Amino acid sequence: DIVMTQSPLSLPVTPGEPASISCRSSQSLQHSYGHNYLDWYVQKPGQSPQLLIYLGSNRASGVPDRFSGSGSGTDFTLRISRVEAEDVGVYYCMQALQTPLMYSFGQGTKLEIK
Amino acid sequence: EVQLVESGGALVQPGRSLRLSCVASGSSFDDDAMHWVRQAPGKGLEWVSGISWNSVYIGYADSVKGRFTISRDNAKNSLYLQMNSLRAEDTALYYCAKDRGFGGMDVWGQGTTVTVSS
């Protein structure tokens, strides 16, 4: 099974400053067609999770462009160029490569405002 | 836009069974894979099970394999999770989520709570 490991688990950030979350997988998430099957989600307090980034680097509909995803293979990064108060929440990476359907999430990274 | 509403959560004794449902409204979901994801109290997200649009491909987390069964009825825009031999560690908020078809789960329900306790 593919194991996802995030760091840090806690991330205090000053508003206006950048933030970065790392996600590593125990196996490559790159499909033979070249896409990386790695998604990023955020769960804001009291809400259901929402999709931020899919296939490693593609912003989901309505996601501000201060969010970006990068990486390939086993190492991925979610970056927020300038953190805003509304970005508070827990951020998860998730692999969607393993077949048959067997996805898995990272432990989550709690972003809080300093 | 699709909206998802889960139901069926309850307080149940260990070893008993429960069936969760998720109904999609606003748009047909029969082109999309669907998933169940759960979140134990104070814990992170755990992918539980997924099913392709035509039910040909099905997968389960190791923690539920052999006990849970996912199914769907596209004519009723409905997704189900049959949970047998429930354990205390199955206590969680269960979300259903729609796969966008090429990366990511883009629509989530509000969740239904399952509590397994004697």
Image: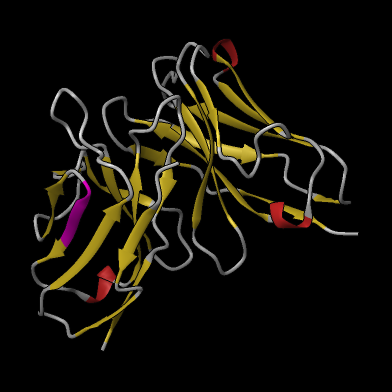
Residue sitting at x 56%, y 39%: B61
Residue B60 appears anywhere in the view: yes
Residue at the location (19% across, 54% down)? A76
Vertical placement of A35 versus B48: above or below? above
Q: Nearer the viewer, residue B8 or A33?
A: A33
Residue B56 point in image, percent of width and height: 50, 11
Colouring scheme applied when the structure was drawn: secondary structure
Number of numbered markers: 0
Residue A10 image-quadrant placement: bottom left
Report if residue B104 lies within the magenta region. no
Please tell me which residue lies in front, A82 or A25: A25
Judge whether residue A76 is colored magenta.
yes
The answer to which quarter of the image holds residue A97 is top left
Instruction: Please report the residue visible at 21 percent of the width from the left and 43 percent of the height from the top.
Output: A60
Position above or below: A82 against A23 = below
Q: Is residue A26 depicted above or below B18 in this figure?
A: below
Which quadrant would the C terminus of chain A be assigned to in this image? bottom left
Q: Which residues are magenta?
A: A74-78
Question: How far across and down, in percent of the image, does residue A105 sit?
Answer: 41, 51
